[in-house]
Image (tube, rainbow, N blue to C red):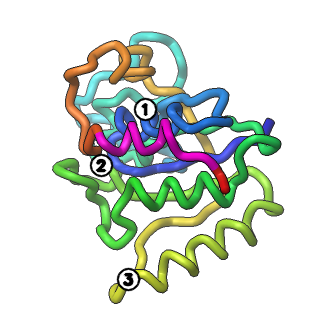
Amino acid sequence: MAEIYFAGGCFWGTEHFFKQIHGVTLTEAGYANGNADWREAVKGSGAPARMDGDGGPSYRQVCTDKTGFAETVRVVYDPGVVSLKFLLEMYFAAIDPTTLNRQGHDEGSQYRTGIYYLSDKDLPVIEMAMEEERRKHEVPLVTEVLPLENFYNAEEYHQDYLDKNPDGYCHLPVSLFEFARKAREK
């Protein structure tokens, strides 16, 4: 198994989108690449800490825009079934890589787009996908490409949110989920 981390706006829709893709074996909503001193940054903000003992930031703390975390989805996949290149193509089908700190109606640095990798061997594939995407736009891309620095699972109510709440809010159109379900690498 291999893994990659995608920040694509609200993680409810991003997580639901990726779990539809054939070859993806696990998805987890969480918070990635935040400031190492995020606890200090939210002191006095009034945002409540997590109650589940995870040790990571709470959703409310991330929403203060002081922690530096992005809503991110951990994607575990079988590279014998689906390639990183294909997952990146799917990722770009689901985001606007030219909009800074916003996807759909969600706005703030926690909704930025980003590709966070664990292995340097993934970087050439990511850079190639970024270059292919760059050619499709007349304005610069703002999607971050960085090594994963940290990741905390989001609270339980965020996990599989759209499965638990089929009529819940999502910045992605429902047709995109069907597209992901049917998509196969050529």
Is 20 situated left or right of 105 in this image?
right
Query: What segment carries the magenta color?
Result: 175-184
Q: State the mark number for residue 65.
A: 2
Q: Is residue 24 or residue 123 the one in the foreground? A: 24
Name the residue that disc number 1 marks: 16
Q: In which quarter of the image is residue 11?
A: top left
- Overall secondary structure of the magenta stretch? helix
Is 3 situated left or right of 5 in this image?
right
- Three-letter amino acid code of the residue under disc 1: His
Indicate the position of residue 147 as horizontal and vertical percent values. Answer: 67, 58
- Three-letter amino acid code of the residue under disc 2: Asp
Q: Quadrant of residue 22?
A: top right
Q: In this view, does 123 lie above or below 61?
A: below
* Disc nearer the start of the sequence (1/3): 1
Disc 3 crowd, CA 10 A, few/some/many (<14, 14-19, 20+): few
Disc 1 crowd, CA 10 A, few/some/many (<14, 14-19, 20+): many
**Closer to viewer: mark 1 or mark 2:** 1
Indicate the position of residue 29 as horizontal and vertical percent values. Answer: 48, 31
Tell me which residue sits at (75%, 41%) in the image: 81
Indicate the position of residue 21 as horizontal and vertical percent values. Answer: 56, 38
Name the residue that disc number 3 marks: 137
